[in-house]
Image: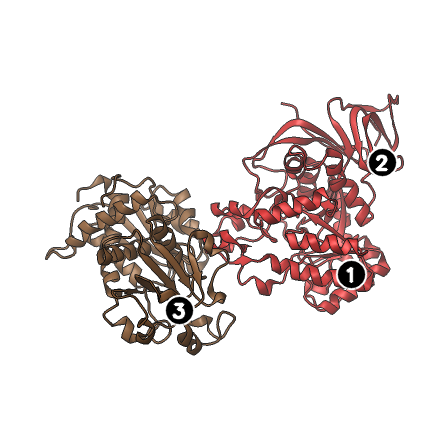
Chain colours: A brown, B red
Amino acid sequence: MRAETSSLRSKDLLGIEHLVPDEITLILDTAEGFKEVSERPVKKVPALRGQLVINLFMEASTRTRVSFEIAEKRLSADTLNFAASGSAVEKGETLIDTAENLMAMAPDMIVIRHKHPGAPKMLAERLPASIINAGDGAHEHPTQALLDAFTIRERLGRLAGVKVSIVGDIAHSRVVRSNIHLLTKMGAKVTLAAPPSLMPVEVERMGVRVVSSLDAAIDDADVIMMLRIQLERQGKLSFPSLREYYNTFGLTPDRLRRAKEGVIVMHPGPMNRGVEIASDVADGPWSVILNQVTNGVAVRMAVLYLLGGAHGEA
Amino acid sequence: MNVLIKNGRVIDPSQDLDATLDVLIEDGAITKIDKRIKANVEVIDAEGLVVVPGLIDLHTHLREPGQEHKETIATGTRAAVAGGYTAVCAMANTVPPNDERAVTEMIIAESARNGSCRVYPIGAVSKGLKGEALAELADLRAAGCVAVSDDGKPVYNAQLMRRALEYCNMLGMPVIAHEEDANLNEGGVMHEGFYSTLLGMGGIPAASEETMVARDVILARVTGAHLHIAHLSTAGAVDAVRNARAAGVRVTCEVTPHHIALSDEAVQSFSTNLKMNPPLRSPEHREAIVAGIADGTVDAIATDHAPHHFDEKNVEFDLAPFGVIGLETAFSVCHERLVRKKVIGLSRLIELMSSGPARIFRLPGGTLAAGAPGDVALLDLDATLTVAAPFQSKAANSPFIGEKLRGRAVTTIVGGVVKYSRKKR
C-alpha cells in the first residue's frame, strides 16, 4: 500500500478528522522509513537541520513529550521545551499571548499539548508556524492514533477490515476520538465498550458499534485497545469503585480466553495496572504496548518531516 | 417631541393593522393614525419603509453597574435603538446585583441621563442572586422593576421559587426563570449531542433545561402565578409550555434569535462567539422552537444580549464566558430566518418582538394606538445588514459576524424623538 500523495494539504496537524485516507497512508509509509533510522547505529538524519521546534506542553505529559523530543532530535531540529509550570502562564498570561511571544522567536513548528479542546486550532489560525496537536482535552490526539495504526499495520499487515475494540473511559478520551476517525477512514471496524456512564452520547454517529460488556468487545476482535481509567473519577458519578470497574471491565488473562487466536492488546499509557488491565496481560504475549512507544518516535518523525521537512533532505 | 411619519406601511399587530398610513406623535405620545394627516410638525418620509411599534427586548444585560468594561447603559441602549428597540428590560445580574431599591433607582436615573431608549429594570428573585432568601420584592416593584429573575442561574430551591411566584402574584409581576440544572452539565460548555462528543467538550443536555421547566410549570400551576421562561431552547421545554398553557397554567416564554438561527454544528469552529447558555442546540431542537413560534406557543423573541469584553472572549472555548450580543442584529436575523423563509408573516414577527413583550410584561408601548408612547421603529426590508464590528455596543461578541441579512431598522423614535437614524451612504 503506497500513498498516492507526497505531501499533506494543511500546514498543521490538528487532528485526524480532516485528513484523507491517502494522507494517513503517506504518514504511515513515511514512518516506516524513519523506523529504520531509529535502528541504525547513528540515529540521526539532517532533515530538519536549522529548524526550530517548540514543544509547548501546557498539560502534564511524559511519554508524548519525550517521544516528540527524540523525534525532533533524530531529525536534527533545534528544540525548546516549554511547560506551563514555572512560566508566565502561572502569572496569568493567556495562551494567545504565550504563543505570540514564542512566535516572535520564529519557530518553524510548535507541538502543543493543552487541556482544552480547540487550543491547537486557535494557534493554527493565528500563527504562521506549523502546529502539531499533541493532545487537546478530550478532543484529538492525532499522533497517538497514527502510532496505533502503524503498530496494527505492522502486526496484522493491514488496517482495512481489522476489528478493533476500544474499552474504557470513552467519554474523556482524546485517544479514542482520533482512533475512531483514523480507523473508520481506513476501513477498520471499531467497537466501543464501557459502562454507559463513560460512553458519550450519539457516539454511534461516528461510525462505530457500541456494546456495554467486555465479553462482547473481546469476541471477534483482532485488536483490543484498553484506555486508562482516570483514578480521580472513581467513587463520583461515573462509576462506583475501581474494584467494581476491574471486575466488570478489567482485561485479565481469564477474560482473554474467549479472544481470537492472535489478538493483540494495546494501551496508550500510562497504564493503571490492576484497574483496566492486569499485569499478566500488559506484560503477556498479546501485548504490543511497548512497540507502540517505539513506533511513536518514527510516526512523529514522519509528521514533523512532512510538515517541516520540505526545506530539507531526508 | 412632535413628529409626523408619512406614507409608511404601518404594521401594528395590537390593532391588526397593515396599511399605508401616517402616524402623528405629539408631546411624546401617539395622537393620531390615519390617511394623509396634516400637521405643522417635523415630517419623516417613510415611503417604502415599514412603520411598527418600537421593539421591546425582555432580556438585556446592560452590565451597569459594575461591569462597565463590557457594556454601559449608554452603549447598551445605543445598540438597542440601532436595532429598532425602543425599550429594553435590564437583567438583574449586575455587580452589585439589582436586589435592592438603590440599585433599581440608579439604573433608572442613569437611563434617564444617558440612555437612548426606555429601560425597565428586572429585579433579583433572591438576595445577592444566591438562591437562599427572597429579595425585597415589593420594594423592587415600587422602585420600578417590571419582573424579577436570578437569570444567569436557576432558582434551585423549589420552595424559594414557589414563594417568589406567590409573592410576585400579589405584586402583579412575572417571575422569569433561567431553567437549568447544572448538576447535569459536568463542565458543560455546549449542547450535549453528537458535536460535543465529536469535539470532546463537556455537554449541557436538553434535560438540564427540561427538568427545571417541568418543575416550574408545576409550581406555576400550584400558585396560579405568572411564570415567564427565559431563552427556551429545547423541544421538550416547548412541549411543556404548550401543554401547560393548554391546561390553563399562566406560563409565557421567550426564545432568542441565535437559537432560532443557529445550531450546535457551528461550534466546530471553536469560536467563542458561539458560546452561550443555554447553548446552541441540535437541529431537532432548533426546529422545535421554530415550530413553537409558528404555532403561537412562543410569546416573545428576546435577545439575551450578553456583552463581554474582547479579552474575555479571546481565550480557549472552555474558558470563555457564556453570552453573545444581539440587540443590533435581532430584527435582521429574525426577518431573514422567519419571515423571508416564510415561517411566519411580518406582522407576527412584530408581535413577537414588540406587542407580545409589552402584553406579557404589561409594559407601555408595543402598539401605535392613540395615547400610546411615541415609540416607533422604521424598517427597510430591502436594505442589507452586513454584520461586522464595530458595533454600537461596547462589545463585539456576535455569533452573526460576517453574515449579510436582509431587512433592518433605519430609524428609531423614542417618545417622539429620533434616537437612531441610519446615515445614508
According to the picture, the residue beneath numbered tag 1 turns out to be B220
Mark closer to the observer (3, 1) = 3
Q: Secondary structure at mark 3?
A: helix
Element type where label 2 sits in the image: helix
Q: Secondary structure at mark 1?
A: helix
Residue B38, compared with residue B228, is above or below; it is above
Along the line of sight, the residue nearer the viewer: A118 or B221: B221
Say few, some or many: other residues with alpha carbon within 10 Å of mark 3 (under 14 / 14 to 19 / 20 or more).
many
Residue B396 lies left or right of residue A40; in this view the side is right
In percent of width and height, residue A179 lies at: 36, 55
Q: Disc 3 residue type?
A: Leu
Q: Residue at x 34, y 47 (%)?
A: A13
Left or right placement of residue B43 versus residue A180 in this view: right
Q: Measured from the top left, where is residue B85 in percent x and y?
A: 73, 39
Read off the residue under disc 3: A214
* Quadrant, the N terminus of chain B: top right
Q: CA distance from mark 1 to mark 2?
A: 30 Å
On the image, numbered disc 2 is attached to which residue?
B15
